[in-house]
Amino acid sequence: MPEQQGHFQRAITLFDAVMIVTGSMIGSGIFIVSADISRQVGSSGWLLVVWLLTGVITLAGAVSYGELASMFPKVGGQYVYLREAYNKLVAFLYGWTLFLVIQTGVIAAVGVAFAKFTGVLIPWFSVKNVLFKTGPLIGDYVFEFSSVQLLAILLIIGITAINARGVRAGKLIQNVLSSTKLVALALLILGGLALGLNAEAVQANFADMWTAVRFPAPGVSASPLPLGLSGLVVAIGMAMTGSLFSSDSWNNIGFAGEEIVNPERTLVRSMAIGTAIVTALYILVNVVYLLALPLVGSPEATTIAGRGIQYATDDRVATAVAEHVLGPAGAVVMAVLIMLSTFGANNGIILSGARAYYAMAKDGLFFSGLARLNAAGVPSRALWAQCLWACLLCLSGSYGQLLNYVMFSVILFYVITIIGIFVLRRTRPDAPRPYRAWGYPVLPIIYVVLASVFCLILLVAEDTALFSRRGLMLVALGIPVYFLFGKRFANTLKE
């Protein structure tokens, strides 16, 4: 069969890898989540601290994680690292969660973001444009299918079809879109600094940078709540859900280990360079936000400045800044930029994720049919399985809730993976390590501590506890699934 004749092609260079890292990281989050962060912490100083802390955690994770990537430059990435550091059960729990919610949930959410911003240019694409609607199905639940869901599904199918044609097609699109969005973000920063300076916003935002106050979400009738030290710590943890989501997917390049030229060096360099570029851009973009618009605003205000960063329409802070700088045309400019950004992000995420399911199937821990390459040397069946589930998540309408505990699961497995560095240093001290984690053991420990505190906050904070605990239950559910369906394959892996 053609699927059995293909082989992975080493076609991804350092530039390609950096574009995959940056393109996968930069989606829609940076243009939106600062509104919610500003409501959680209530001041410009703490807003920037959230983004700086996110950058530190992400960079610490990337430069530590690189040791594992250089030791095991195999298709499957983090799944392989967990298998080698621990055992097949831990690896399966990661792959199970990756397929059910982490990778596919993000693909669905980014696809919907693309469709919503397309609506700025083509109003027909709107959540209010319901194409199909049922009567009550379960209780009062009514299934609705909107034009936004239709476009999101078509986008996911289209990108999957492109990547099924071969890694060169996928990387070409990624290079073009990632380069374009990096240039566009740089122009947004320069344009905002040159044309968007608002003296009143500067005075309002920087006269008092450190008074922490929690503001209500749009539509919620409540008074602002001053935050003490413990409340501020919890608020920062909750706020980082959005900033960490915006900075995630830096590890996706590891899934394509056997398709990378000189992977032992390229993987480490691309993750470090890519995360550093994105971190710097994110902080500069938020500085521009603060120079152009007041942070504190009112949801009832009718002007851009009056709504501020906190209550920008639909949380679209970047669009509000663009309108402030360019007038009404700014909304169109930002819509195009975010469409390019989300398209590129989904391309990188779709390209990468299928490689993990392929590796699982090769180990006998997932559907065996996914352990095949097509004639173009890509795991097309794994790509289409991922596509199908992501499209179902689009149909379910649950992508927003999924994202609330995607980050808990993501960071939990990052912590377990980074701890794997210490495990392998003890169990395989003489194994070749083309790259050793920078700052070991201090920097990996800092990452594990900070990331663990973040997970703990999500588990106990009132607004996030329900979804985080569901995320933990989803991971735990993989244990009986593994023993029910994976035990018969136990002899296919080294214990």
Image (cartoon, helix red, strand yellow):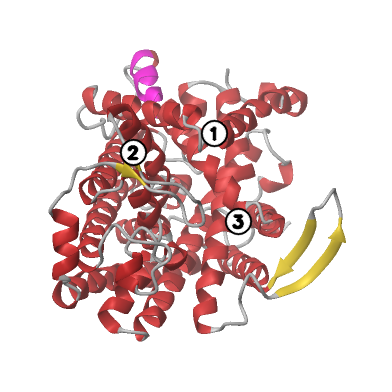
Residue shown at the point (50%, 55%) measured from the top left:
349
- Image quarter of residue 186: bottom left
74 or 388: nearer the eye?
Answer: 388
Task: Name the N-terminal-most of marks 2 and 3.
Answer: 3
Q: Nearer the viewer, mark 2 or mark 3?
A: 2
Residue 454 in sight: yes
- Image quarter of residue 477: top right
Q: Give the residue type at disc 1.
A: Ser
Task: Name the N-terminal-most of marks 1 and 2.
Answer: 2
User: Where does the image place residue 146, in percent across and percent down from the top left?
Assistant: 69, 70
Q: Which residue is mark 2?
A: 236
As measured in the structure, the alpha-carbon distance from the residue carrying label 3 to the one carrying label 1 is 40 Å
Q: Which residues are magenta?
A: 418-426
60 or 241: nearer the eye?
Answer: 241
Residue shown at the point (86%, 54%) measured from the top left:
137
Quick check: marks 1 and 2 in contact, CB under 8 Å? no
Q: Give the residue type at disc 3.
A: Gly
User: Where does the image place residue 303, in percent across and percent down from the top left?
Assistant: 35, 74
Q: Nearer the viewer, mark 1 or mark 2?
A: 2
For label 3, count other residues whose C-alpha is less than 10 Å away and answer few (under 14), some (14-19) or many (20+): some
Callout 3 secondary element: loop
User: Where does the image place residue 282, in percent across and percent down from the top left?
Assistant: 28, 56
Residue 423 sits inside the magenta stretch: yes
For label 2, count other residues whose C-alpha is less than 10 Å away and answer few (under 14), some (14-19) or many (20+): many
Q: Which residue is mark 1?
A: 468
Callout 1 secondary element: helix
Give above or below for 194 relative to 67. Answer: below
User: Where does the image place residue 411, in percent across and percent down from the top left?
Assistant: 44, 35
Q: Which residue is mark 3?
A: 6
